[in-house]
Image (tube, grey):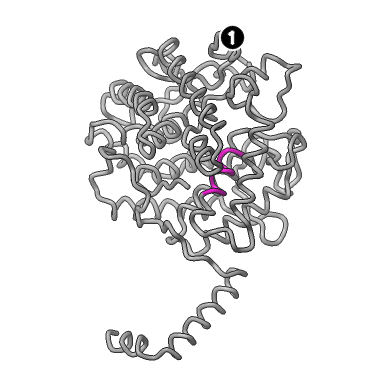
Amino acid sequence: MAIATQSTHRNPLHRGLKRLALFAVTVAVFGSVQAAPNFPFGSHRQSYVSGTLSPSVGRAAADQSTASFYRAWKQRYLVAGCKAGEYRVKASTDTAYVVSEGQGYGMLITVMMAGNDPEAQTLFDGLHRYNRGHPSGGNPALLSWAQDSSCRNVAGNSSASDGDLDIAYALLLADAQWGSAGAINYASEARKVIAAIRSSTIHPNNKLVHLGDWVSPGSAHQYNATRSSDWMLGHFRSFGAKLGDSYWTGVLDAHQNLLARMQSTYAPNTGLLPDFIVNTTGTPRPAEVDFLEGENDGIYGWNAGRVPWRIGIDAAVSGDSRSRTAARKLNQWAKAKSGNNPNNLRSVYKLDGNHTGNYNSVFFTAPFAVAATVDTDQAWLDKLWSYMANGGASDYYGDSVKLLSMLAVSNNWIRP
């Protein structure tokens, strides 16, 4: 092998023919040339702040576990769209086959798996093409939030803020990962989505994220409400930095202020946030039962369960002391509540820490691993990592949030 390698390097013609052959194979298999990633999975080029914990198994083992679970996730949930060149994440919820939140997750995952999966850019581009084929009726630069298996819009034709926020952030990552000189100008597409988010899904007065582009001042109760799992602090930070727009610093600060207020006022012993917060232009409070989705709207339910991941990764990457304080509060409650055993965490909690669902769920447990990275208990983080790395399959929602949490904890998260 050594002799053949040396011979190849001595012969420029051989090198050129080899490159042409590789180019032909790439085009034949993927339909386009794949750009070399600037932040390949496993390179750990994105630095985390000093003191951030990593699993004791080491980076190579953590990368292996993450890549293995990615392959399973991809096989289960990443499928072709209804048009050539499109891909979609199969959510198969009670309401829809595809939801915008899942498209955002898929774009985040594939852009961060570049360098491990040779199809990553093709899949990412296909997800984006699917999104552009399903514009929201409220703002066409945003994604209509739900489709059936035949790619027809269902449950209305409007946006959900979480999906669009992740899509915008993922497009910025794609520009950082592959550049924007290819078939899709990622930077330009990101700017379009970010501008649409600003004009259609940010409250003009308090700068908090709306539930989607469907709310209107005429329905004040919903217009003056926000979903805690949409508080993507690192996204707001990156929007401002990449666009050179101080407006997003104001958006970041508004969410940090409400985060601290909700924790101190309604969950001083747990740090838990409710799924929805209402009356944001007055005295913010947890939403009432059946405000939007059901009986858990005012407690730590199937939306807010993502909060420890969102806040934790911002603390790990940015070092913002406000994010660190909030994430640590959540982590320390979870560790104490579970008796240092991730399997003892339950699903759906009241803000005082009493659970309403008497079962363990990876969706609720995995995000606490991200919050644990910015605290000081290595043994607790290792238990959470083992829980994720050795756990079985869940469903689209739990598996997607688990994989995103694994990417964050294994030091494979990137920011533009």
Residue 13: percent from the left, percent from the top? 45, 91
- Examine the image and state in which quarter residue 329 appears: top left
Residue at the image point whose x is 32% and y is 31% from the top:
342
Residue 216: percent from the left, percent from the top? 73, 22
Task: Tell me if residue 292 can be seen.
Answer: yes
Amino acid found under the numbered disc labelled 1: Gly
Residue 214: percent from the left, percent from the top? 72, 28
Residue at the image point whose x is 45% and y is 33% from the top:
310
Quadrant including the N terminus: bottom left
Task: Tell me if residue 302 can be seen.
Answer: no
Residue at the image point whose x is 52% and y is 82% from the top:
21
Residue 134: percent from the left, percent from the top? 73, 45
Magenta stretch prevailing secondary structure: helix
Q: Is residue 310 left or right of residue 243?
A: left
Callout 1: helix, strand or loop? loop
Q: Nearer the viewer, residue 244 or 294?
A: 244
Range of magenta residues: 164-172
Query: Residue 250 in magenta?
Result: no
Q: Nearer the viewer, residue 250 or 300?
A: 250
Residue linked to disc 1: 282
Q: Is residue 121 above or below residue 223?
A: below
